[in-house]
């Protein structure tokens, strides 16, 4: 398939399905999203100088940050300030734009024009890692100047196959040692090291965890968390990510709307879209820290990939909110397989 044929096929597909998103269109066409974006006449390839590119976004003022995976889309509006990059890791620490960046996964960057200009980044597989869109308050002149300064020569996108994950059987794991180390955690960030040391995947870790620290619950727990947080104005944290970026919302949620398979938060400055038909497991997870137990609701797809995590709003050095702990504890009564309340309506 030539590049021009790919773009023409996309235009024909869009004519048939005007609301079709480019990610889904690319899948239907047997291409990666990055390959399709690269053929957009309004797209320009950018030099992957992540430090100056991300650091320069501050001058543009408010922007919309979008990070997604197959089953969740997280959109947050704010300024890209306090961006820190060290080697292949990066952070953006702001009340609104709160990101964890895994830059070893970042490969292709494009400036995409049209009615709503954007900066779009893709990984080596051609999947979207992070997208940044202008909003009404954006300084478009500054945004365009930054992108123009990073213009690079065009080159074809050649997606690389994603390495197959090595799956270690349960019987090859020292479960007693794994459970003891879980009980000895002192920070939530130590959890990743625990998984690496024992060679376990996330859902496998939850199955093998000390029983008091992980319990599978029904998918209706997601509805309960969002509905209860909205009704009581309980501030929560919502993490959505992929291999290259994790995006975080901290604060209240208000307008919860169910649209077909999508469960949505539609608030000013924060939108969350959860495709619940792709959710297969939900777990109530507890991790010991020096500040006390930290409790989360974690959701996974059929392949065991993490879709979304919910926490109560929390600052380092302080215990989690008692209201969040009570809400999370109540989720234990929602048995796996229990129909979602809103799904019955």
Image: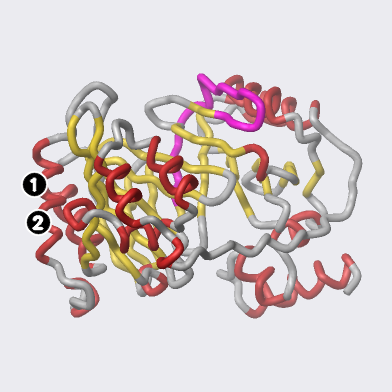
Compared across the picture, whether 86 is left or right of 342 comes to right
Q: What element carries label 2?
A: helix
Disc 2 vs disc 1: Cβ atoms closer than 8 Å? yes
What is the C-alpha distance between the residues marked 2 and 1? 6 Å
Residue 139 figure quarter: top right
- The label number, if any, that marks residue 326 in the structure image: 1
Residue 340 figure quarter: bottom left
Residue 226 figure quarter: bottom left
Task: Name the residue at 61% across, 26% down.
Answer: 57
Q: Give the residues in magenta.
A: 74-90
User: Residue 133, percent across and down?
Assistant: 58, 41
User: Residue 167, percent across and down?
Assistant: 53, 65
Q: In this view, does 20 lie above or below 54?
A: below
Q: In this view, does 278 lie above or below 233?
A: below
Compared across the picture, whether 228 is left or right of 49 comes to left
- The label number, if any, that marks residue 330 in the structure image: 2
Compared across the picture, whether 323 is left or right of 204 comes to left
Bin the neighbour count of mark 1 within 10 Å (Cα to Cα): few under 14, some 14-19, many 20 and up: few
Q: Viewer-proximal residue, 122 or 166?
A: 166
């Amino acid at each position: 398939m030539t590049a021009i044929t790919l773009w023409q096929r996309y235009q024909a597909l869009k004519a048939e399905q005007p609301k079709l998103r480019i990610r889904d269109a690319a899948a239907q066409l047997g291409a990666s999203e990055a390959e399709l974006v690269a053929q957009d006449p309004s797209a320009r390839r950018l030099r992957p100088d992540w430090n100056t590119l991300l650091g320069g976004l501050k001058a543009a003022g408010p922007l919309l940050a979008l990070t997604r995976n197959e089953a969740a889309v997280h959109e947050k509006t704010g300024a890209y300030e306090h961006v820190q990059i060290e080697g292949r890791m990066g952070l953006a620490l702001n009340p609104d734009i709160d990101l964890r960046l895994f830059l070893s996964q970042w490969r292709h960057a494009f400036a995409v024009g049209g009615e709503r200009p954007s900066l779009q980044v893709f990984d080596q597989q051609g999947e979207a890692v992070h997208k940044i869109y202008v909003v009404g308050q954006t300084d478009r002149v500054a945004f365009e100047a930054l992108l123009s300064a990073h213009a690079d020569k065009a080159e074809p996108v050649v997606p690389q196959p994603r390495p197959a994950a090595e799956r270690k059987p349960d019987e090859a794991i020292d479960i007693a040692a794994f459970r003891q180390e879980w009980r000895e955690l002192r920070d939530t960030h130590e959890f990743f090291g625990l998984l690496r040391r024992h060679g376990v995947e996330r859902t496998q870790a939850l199955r093998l965890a000390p029983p008091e620290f992980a319990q599978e619950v029904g998918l209706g727990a997601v509805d309960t968390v969002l509905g209860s947080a909205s009704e009581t104005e309980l501030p929560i944290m919502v993490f959505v990510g992929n291999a290259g970026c994790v995006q975080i919302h901290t604060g209240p949620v208000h307008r919860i709307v169910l649209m077909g398979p999508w469960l949505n938060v539609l608030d000013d400055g924060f939108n969350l879209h959860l495709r619940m038909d792709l959710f297969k497991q939900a777990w109530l997870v507890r991790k010991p820290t020096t500040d006390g137990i930290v409790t989360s609701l974690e959701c996974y797809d059929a392949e065991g990939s993490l879709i979304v995590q919910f926490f109560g709003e929390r600052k380092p050095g302080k215990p989690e909110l008692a209201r969040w702990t009570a809400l999370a504890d109540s989720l234990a009564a929602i048995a796996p397989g229990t129909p979602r309340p809103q799904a019955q309506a």
